[in-house]
Image (cartoon, helix red, strand yellow):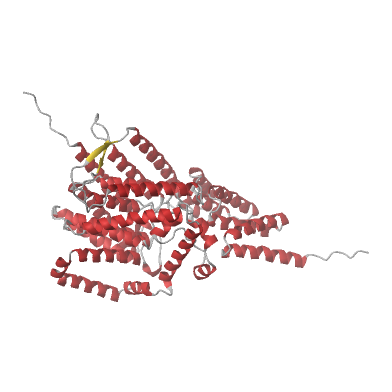
Amino acid sequence: MEATTPTVNVGARRSVALAFVLGALFVVTVVAVDPRGLVPSGPLRWTATLALMGAAVCTLLLQPVMGNPRRIPRIPQTAGNPRRIPQQWVAWLWVGLLLWLFLASVFGADALHAWIGTPDRRMGWLAWLTFPLMYLCGQALTSELDRRIVLRGAAIAAGILGVWCVFERAGWSLIDESFAGHRVGGPFGQPAYVGAIAVLLAPLSAGVAFDRAGSRAWRVVGAAGAIGATAALLLAQTRGAWFGIVVALVLLGSRHSAVARRRWREIGLVAAAIVVLFAVTPLGGRAAGAFDLGHGTTRGRFDDWAVGARVVEHDPFIGVGPEGYRVVFPRVVSERYVRCYGTDVIPDRAHNGIIDVATSGGVVAGLLYAALLVLLLVAAWRSMRGRDPLTLALACAAVAYIVQQQFLFPLSEIDPLFWVVAGMLVASRAAGPARERRVNRAIPAVIAVLVLFGVVMGTREVLADRLLERAATEPGATGLHDADRATRLRPDSIRTWYVAARIAARGETITDVDAAVKRVERGLRQSPRDPALRVLHADLLVQRALRSGLDDDRARAEAVVDGYIADAPHEARLQRDRLALDSTRSSTRAVRPAAPEKS
């Protein structure tokens, strides 16, 4: 009689490993902050999350048992569930959107950053590529255990986020940032980002808290995470995020109206507590300001949408490419907008998810992205009929995030988490056994090499960012030496060249101005139409002309400034540079001695 070998469920082992990686992605997205860097919330988070996303994709593709073919789970299409959203629709929408954005990147307004993204937003085509990959990873998690692991990671991240925001409101934070109205920026250094991730983490944490199949310890962790994410949501004072969570709760209540009627006392008590909280704190004024359509930030948001719509109107077919909005903004913005809001901070994104995508890829890209979001909203609405707390949490998180994004824009830091949630939400509606599809053995190796290259470049950027922070506080040649080392680590980064030029210009001699001009022109080679670099370039050339008093320097400065004004007719700083040149020319003519009369 032959001995039997116990069967190993390879797919289950693979999905659990993937779930742990995705759960860690939620935590790392919140905690990856580098206080020693010039931008603490930037390079380290991007590098760490890229490594985890690469690990997740490779885990999805690789088979943990040697000798077995590598396969990737595919959710079946069954005729017995006609209310399900066909997976082919989502797949073809993603393929169409990525191909269209690829075409927009080829002809984009910023040839380099359309692919890799700017150091501030990182929303190039490669960042867009991570979203469907994270969606596939989330879609592969079909078991209750897998989803529970990921949501527990989200609950831990929510608790950390809440503690961070509370400490920051009390006056202590690793990131030295301050915002109007005592808003908190948390580990992201931006209140809007805190609101965006809070509406995602709060429902997921609540799902863990109400998960009866979980242990008491994990339910406590979920409750703490829900409280922490709610505190972060309130302290960030992001009204678009508030609106998103309200819409999700209203839809959930309408789906479970019978339960809401039975629990009317508890719901009324919570509603009364919220009203009192907003009445006795500045939160009430912040909420009331949303209805002031003629002034304030609400009017500013409408004006931002109008500028974004104007960009789409100018380039309706292919758009301006990813990260091209900041390049064309000075050319299309109206004089009234500049008069109302100034240009000290040049907007680099349209503050509406669909409009923002339309500016990057034209009307076609905007429609494809809108269709994706509509399909997810339909899936969430249908999922809200059930009573499983994990599925309800996924549905509420998806709805809240989609709604708040229409007052912000897609985020390279947080949207991967949203698409993981979207994938799990769609997978939770799948019926029947999952089939598998073969994957070429070379694909995981190629992905691993690409991720490794990205991590190496990210590590170099982390080091460069620390050098820039040190250079900003060091005097003289030492600071400039550190800034130049940063440019050698990341010569493709416009931030390193911008900061190096500013540091070089701190000197008092004309040779220091020349050194600054040299560095800003190196940055302009990477992004010839970057507005910040152009303004700095014009300022330096005008300063050079004023110090030297030479006609050649003045002529060069005038040519550059006039060329920049042609692309940015309402840029106040360029206009000031032109006036400075004109006043210098006038004063020179006034003191010039009269020519002797001919005899």
Q: Quadrant of residue 459?
A: top left
Could you say where residue 294 lies in the image, as x and y percent from the top left?
43, 75
Q: Image point 52% across, 57% down: which residue?
A: 328
Q: Image point 39% across, 39% down: which residue?
A: 450
Q: Residue furthest left?
A: 1
Q: Image point 55% across, 53% down: which residue?
A: 529
Q: Residue furthest right?
A: 599
- Which quarter of the figure is the C terminus placed in? bottom right
Q: Quadrant of residue 70?
A: top left
Could you say where residue 276 lies in the image, as x and y percent from the top left?
25, 75
Q: Is residue 61 above or below residue 236?
A: above
Q: Of 239 and 428, which appears nearest the observer?
A: 428
- Number of labels in the image equals 0
Could you say where residue 342 lies in the image, as x and y percent from the top left?
51, 67
Q: Is residue 160 above or below residue 593?
A: above
Does the image show residue 504?
Answer: yes
Q: Is residue 233 left or right of residue 528?
A: left
- Which quarter of the figure is the N terminus placed in? top left
Q: Of 590 and 13, which appears nearest the observer?
A: 13
Q: Residue furthest top?
A: 1
Q: Is residue 245 left or right of residue 532?
A: left
Does the image show residue 27?
Answer: no
Could you say where residue 585 lies in the image, as x and y percent from the top left?
71, 63
Q: Of 282 and 110, which appears nearest the observer?
A: 110
